[in-house]
Every structure is written in C-alpha cells, then in structure tokens.
Amino acid sequence: MASGPLALVGGAEFTDGCTFDRDLLEAAGGHEVLVVPTGAAYEHPERLVERAERWFRGLGGSARGLDVLARSDALDPDHVAAVRSARFIYLAGESPMHLRSVFKDTPVWDAIVTAWRDGAVLAGSVAGAMVLCDPMVDPRGGAFTVGLGLLANLGVIPEFDTWSEDAVQRTRRLSPAGLILAGIPRRTALLRDAEGSWRAAGIGDVSVFRGGEPADLDALT
C-alpha cells in the first residue's frame, strides 16, 4: 500500500545529529511540521514544541505544536482538521502508554493514518515510535503489549543505547517467533520510504532481531 515516508526515531529528537530531519522536511515539500507532544503531556510538552520550532527553523522550515494531550483533545474536530491537512506529522514524548490511551480509536488517530496513507510524512520519536508498532514493547518491563498497529509484526526499542544488556536479552527472549525487533539509539532513525524500503540514518546503528535472534535490515522487506 502506498503511503508517505515514515521515521521511527530513537530519541534525543530535534538535536544535532538528527540529520534525517532535513530529508523528511524536503519530502514534505518544505511544509510546516505539526508536532503532537502527547507522549510528553505530563512533562512540559511546550518545551518539546519549542525545541522543535528552533530545530526546524534552523533547517529552513517551521514547526508548531498541536496540544492533543488528553483523550478529549483527540476527539476535537479542529484537531482532526489540523492533522488531516498536515504534510509532516511528528509524534513525540516519552510515555507510550499515555499516548496509546489518548489516541486509540479516536478521530485524530484516524486522521493521522489517513494523512500518512495520502502521502504525508509521519515521524515518531520514543513513545511515538513505539505506539506505531504492534506488538509494542512495554517500557515497564520489556515485555510486549498492544500498540496502535500502523506497522504490524514490528516492535522497536527506542533509546537503545541506554538499555542494559540484561534488559535487551529479556526482551529478545520474550519476542514472538517471526517478530522483527529494532533497537534504535538516540539521534538515529529507522526510515521507511514511500515505496516501502527501509534504511537507517543518524549517528548510530540500528540493531535488528527476528524472533529474538540477530538479523539485519533486510528482515524488514
């Protein structure tokens, strides 16, 4: 199925090293980036948006925030319209459980999916990357739970460079057979182009596992 470009970002978004954002901005036609800081709802989401504004201004673009912070916000027709008209949507924050509870089965989530399938760029960092997948890695213990399911049979571990070897091994042991698991460090992205091809970008290397065993990016095709 055709869609827009997609980026799963490991963290430290909107900072030096996230060179892939320039390509994403270009793919969106240089349009404004709509930053949805749902995953940071309880951690000063305005600061995340301000950082994004500075970052994308430095890349020759612009950004603005959309305060979808609670479930009622995800039902707001004005928010739905803003998402539906966006050409670059960026989901950010650190709490995937909150982000999932806000978006699941809502008009805003439907609008995000529709915009992406119509060619908009979609990026998710940390919580945003995690919830796009199903199953989703549960940050509370490294097991698996239900995500929003945009990407099936793929799970991601963001901030992979901060995970202990024991934590990584536990998640690998719990991986269902055939599941593709991607460990994405900070300032690094796993990118999917409009044709469905995957590549890594940024300062780190993406670690890929299939059914808990080491694999490479070819496993995603």
Image (cartoon, rainbow, N blue to C red):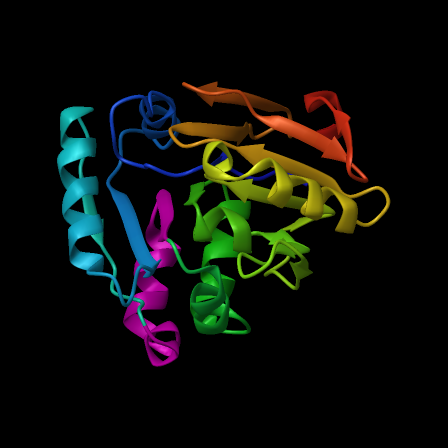
| Residue extending furthest toward the front | 166
Left or right placement of residue 36 versus residue 45 in this view: right
User: In the rendering, at what x and y percent does residue 98 appear?
Assistant: 43, 68
Q: Report the number of numbered marks.
A: 0
What's the residue at 38%, 23% (across, down)?
20
In the rendered image, the vertical position of residue 130 relative to residue 203, given as above or below: below
Q: Quadrant of residue 215?
A: top right
| Residue extending furthest toward the bottom | 72
- Can residue 175 be seen in the rendering of this structure? no
Asked if the stretch drawn in magenta spans residue 62, the answer is no
User: In the rendering, at what x and y percent does residue 9 appear?
Assistant: 44, 36
Where the N terminus falls, by quadrant?
A: top right
Where the C terminus falls, by quadrant?
A: top right
- Can residue 138 be seen in the rendering of this structure? yes
User: In the rendering, at what x and y percent does residue 125 appear?
Assistant: 41, 44
What's the residue at 19%, 60% (across, down)?
44
Nearest the viewer among 30 and 8 is 8
User: In the rendering, at what x and y percent does residue 61 appear?
Assistant: 19, 31
Nearest the viewer among 197 and 124 is 124
Q: Which stretch did the figure color magenta?
A: 70-93
Asked if the stretch drawn in magenta spans residue 91, the answer is yes
What's the residue at 41%, 60% (across, down)?
95
Left or right placement of residue 147 versus residue 94 in this view: right
Nearest the viewer among 150 and 112 is 150
